[in-house]
Image: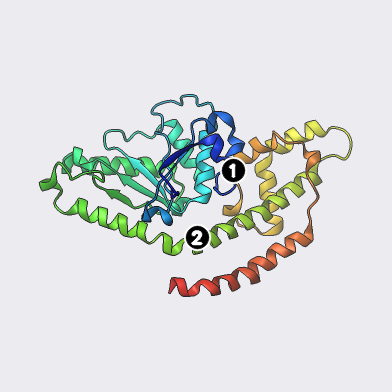
Amino acid sequence: MSGPAERTIPGHTVAVQTDLPFSGLTSFGGPFLSKFQVSQMQHPLLENMTFVDTPGVVCGENQPRNYDFTGVISWFAAKCDVILLLFDPQKLDISDEFEQIISSLQGYEDKIRVILNKADQVDNKQLRKVYGALMWSLGKVLSTPKAPRVYIGSFDKKPEHEAAAGNDFEQEQDDLLLDLEDVPKKACDRKINDFVKRARSAKIHSYIISQLMKDMPPLVGKAKAKKKLIHDLEKLFAKVRKQYGFPAGDFPSVEQFREVLNRHNFADFGKLDLKMIQAVDEMLSNDIPQLLKKFQTLYG
């Protein structure tokens, strides 16, 4: 990222610097912060852009990490503008860990760009097979009706099989760069869009918690009731969805919500504040459209 001088800052130090946007990472604990670091340097490109490079994904069955890797990925996914998924034609198998990571990107599918790198290592016939295998694998884990665009090429050097590739790799690289160049122009639009999604999610979250509180017994049997409510969470989601007319796609993951609920005492939950719900509705209906009008010249 951009900085006054070329330097590397350790994760524990970065997390307490209020002028940097990484304080939220403290929730992932010391084991993660010990591995996280920020590199700064002066460069015109970095004045408007920050790159985040994640560790390579473990192949095969899950290997234990001493921090919540998918949680960290999800944290960054919520804040970034583009997510680049890089694949190697020699290593197309989507491991258990990679599948969990892609699942954690639910709700951010529009940010994903898929890159098949090092495509010069195979000939055209093999490349077609590799592409088909990649699309089949992605189709199993990406919950989108439309297949993502896959950029094919060798993005770190001149293709070895240049004669076989023709100008295709260069065109793919140009298309990817045009796509990435368009990202800063839509940054404001995306931030507002993400804010609206979070506001809707918070509203639904409030109604879910309110319904949980209503279904809890007033005095005895709370532990047993909590266990049953968490087990029947899908039914509760359906009940809230039907009662208030919320779209099914706006609800959180049932499994993730179960995991979070198991860690909390329902007695700590507050009551539903209808005035705050009304304020959110007014914001979505009036304030956001007015805000978009102020930025409409940027998109014209």
Q: Which is nearer the N-term, disc 1 or disc 2? A: 1
Q: In the figure, is residue 173 to the left or right of 13? A: left
Label 1 sits on a secondary structure element that is helix
In this view of the protein, can residue 107 be seen by the observer? no
Q: Front-most of 30 and 134?
A: 30
Task: Give the spatial CA distance, label 1 vs label 2.
Answer: 22 Å
- The residue depicted at 78 percent of the width and 62 percent of the height is 275
Residue 190: mark: 2
Q: Quadrant of the C terminus?
A: bottom left
Q: Front-most of 256 and 85?
A: 85
Q: In the figure, is residue 43 to the left or right of 271? A: left
Task: Locate residue 94: give its quadrant.
Answer: top left
**Is residue 89 shown above or below 292?**
above
Question: For mark 1, does the 10 Å Cα neighbourhood hold few (<14), some (14 to 19), or many (20 or more) residues?
Answer: some
- Count of numbered circles in the view: 2
**Mark 1: amino acid:** Ser
**Is residue 253 shown above or below 287?**
above
In this view of the protein, can residue 197 be seen by the observer? yes
Label 2 sits on a secondary structure element that is helix
Q: In the figure, is residue 280 to the left or right of 41? A: right
Residue 280 image point, x, y percent? 69, 62
Residue 282 image point, x, y percent? 69, 68
Residue 23: mark: 1
CB within 8 Å, label 1 to label 2: no
Task: Locate residue 160: give its quadrant.
Answer: top left
Find the residue positioned furthest to the front.
Answer: 5
- The residue depicted at 32 percent of the width and 40 percent of the height is 87
Q: Front-most of 236 and 97?
A: 97
Residue 283 image point, x, y percent? 66, 66
Q: In the figure, is residue 197 to the left or right of 3? A: right
